[in-house]
Image (cartoon, grey):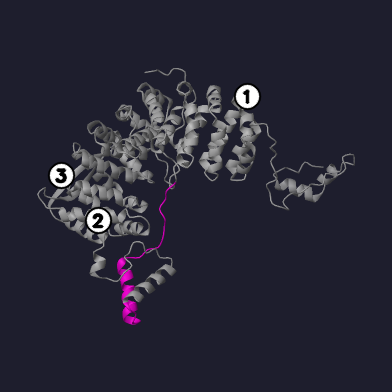
Amino acid sequence: CHALRSMGLQPPPPTAMNKDKKVAPTFAARIQQDTFDEAVRENMEDLDMEEEEAVQDAIAQFEAQGIDLSNVLKAAPSAERDAHPVVRGCALLEAATREGEDTVRELSFGKGAAQSTMKLNFKTMATSQDTRDLEAALAAMRGACTEAGEPGRQALALLGAREGMDLLPSACLACLHHGALPEVLRTLASAMADVENRDRVGVRGLLAIQACLVERATDAEVQAAALAAAAAAMVGHEANRECLHDKCAITSSAAAALDTHSGDDSVVLAACAVLRALTLQDDARKQINKGFDRARSAVEAGVLPLLVAQVGRDDTGTEAEAGSSSARRTAALLLTLSRIACSNKTCEALVDLGALDQAIGLLRRYVADPGVCRPCAIFLSALAGNDDVKQRLSEAQVPEVTSALLSGHLESSGTLDAVAQLLTALTTRHTANCEAFLAAGGAETLLAAMRHHPRHAGLNKRGCLTCRNLAVRTEDGTRLLLDQGAEPLLRELMGKSAEMHDLAKAALRDMHRDVSLAQPWKGMPGESYMLEQGDANGENRFSQYLDTPEARAAMEAAGFDTSQMV
């Protein structure tokens, strides 16, 4: 493979390219199910209300007090209410985790001087025990938790209120060598779609997931389910990421799963989800993130050759159907590689492994499939921070391909944003790429994409940066952009936000348009004052002022010694 020698600017870390949406739990007053049931009972007994009226009155009273009722079943006690999938599933889980043989297992976590041991006490389920009812109840619970809208959110809150986040890890340990383990892990992963449930899982729950990965290393179904649960636990939760990475060695487990089960798509997708989740910076409660360090740790664990080899599986020379398992796997692999391509050294390794050539080939082959060309563009933009990679992409005519992508995916704002990200990297400090893009009609396609999605901040910000690159790097760039109506578009963008104002103004300035660079007065009316300067040629009475008691008092208050003054 081509070896990179002269280095350009270091590619930005994953968190700089992908600004992750911040996630934080919401805080609200809540009540227990017993409190709600008591209020309904009092309405029926003391106020002679009908059951439905009593329930609605209780709901109205609690909501008027600001109580969040998502964790209770808003119905009168009945057999039908007890048949709710979450209630029934938690009841069967509790029964399953209280039966069986007492087991004590010591799990070591951490490494070096920070290594510790946790002793876990749990019941082990007999391998011969019939768990068909339990598995059916767990599947129904998972279905309720993944339901869209308010029913799904209520099911997740109810699961947390019913101690489901304690029962599910206990069930993982109880079923450690039982066939029901994959279903338990899948339900645990679904339950952690709620940020508060991720808070509740705790170190014990994370260690239970790691125990499943270690004990059932040869079982592809268990590996896929356990890795998916680990990835779900890390979304929006920096503490869980630290625990899984530093104490549970989840990076090594993901690499081992990729190596052992390289032919299983579900394992590959789950391992990719884990590696991406490790680099997220989405916990609003944390100011410091170690995504860069974790990405480097993943590289040291040897995941690059494994991931690139998986991309090679899909690089067969024939186009897969849009949305197929092959296309989904390719997208996941490229997005994962883009997250961990966090240093120049990593970019060198990826190019030497052939990932650059594979991504260029996939971009050309799947030019009409947004599900693949979008992650291809994101991955190539991660590598394009290197000047040698820019040249390789220029030789492969990628700037011309980006122009075609902008016109071919006009309705897909996400794809356009990724292509604009690649285009910004390609045109930075590279005149040949700017000229090739303009020659392919890039000015027209870029501005058309920006006009079609005026509210998409990411696309328009990168569009402004690309306009600057095209204007300053080519002789005809400014003329071509102005001919396509760039000036009114950029002036309109100046009113969108403060950041957009600065980017659009800078683009107009580099295109030699008339813009005001003066900083206006930012105070409030009435806050400006003018000091009286006096007559410059008049009599100087400063020495007379120093003799006044007021002047002496001011100097003494400031710490000056006035005892020697005449």
Q: Quadrant of residue 332?
A: top left
Q: Is residue 84 left or right of residue 510?
A: left
The amino acid type found where label 2 is placed reads Ala
Describe the element under mark 1 as helix, strand or loop.
loop
Describe the element under mark 2 as helix, strand or loop.
helix
Give me the residue at 46% from left, 30% from top: 381
Residue 419 location in percent, x, y?
A: 47, 34
Describe the element under mark 3 as helix, strand or loop.
loop
Residue farthest along the right direction in this orientation: 538
The answer to which of marks 2 and 1 sits earlier in the sequence is 2
Residue placed most toward the observer, 481 or 165:
481
Residue 337 location in percent, x, y?
A: 37, 32
Up the image or down, 363 lies above or below 524; here it is above
Front tag of 2 and 3: 2
> Would you name the residue on which mark 1 appears?
475
Counting the numbered discs, the total is: 3
Quadrant for the C terminus in the image = top right
Structural distance between the alpha carbons of marks 2 and 1: 64 Å
Q: Is residue 344 left or right of residue 223?
A: right
Front tag of 1 and 3: 1
The answer to which of marks 2 and 3 sits earlier in the sequence is 2
The answer to which of marks 1 and 3 sits earlier in the sequence is 3
Give me the residue at 44% from left, 42% from top: 20
> Would you name the residue on which mark 2 appears?
140
Residue 156 location in percent, x, y?
A: 32, 56
Quick check: can you spot residue 426?
Answer: yes
Q: Which residues are magenta?
A: 22-50
Circle 1 packing at 10 Å, graded few (<14), some (14-19), many (20+), is few
> Would you name the residue on which mark 3 appears?
177
Structural distance between the alpha carbons of marks 1 and 3: 69 Å
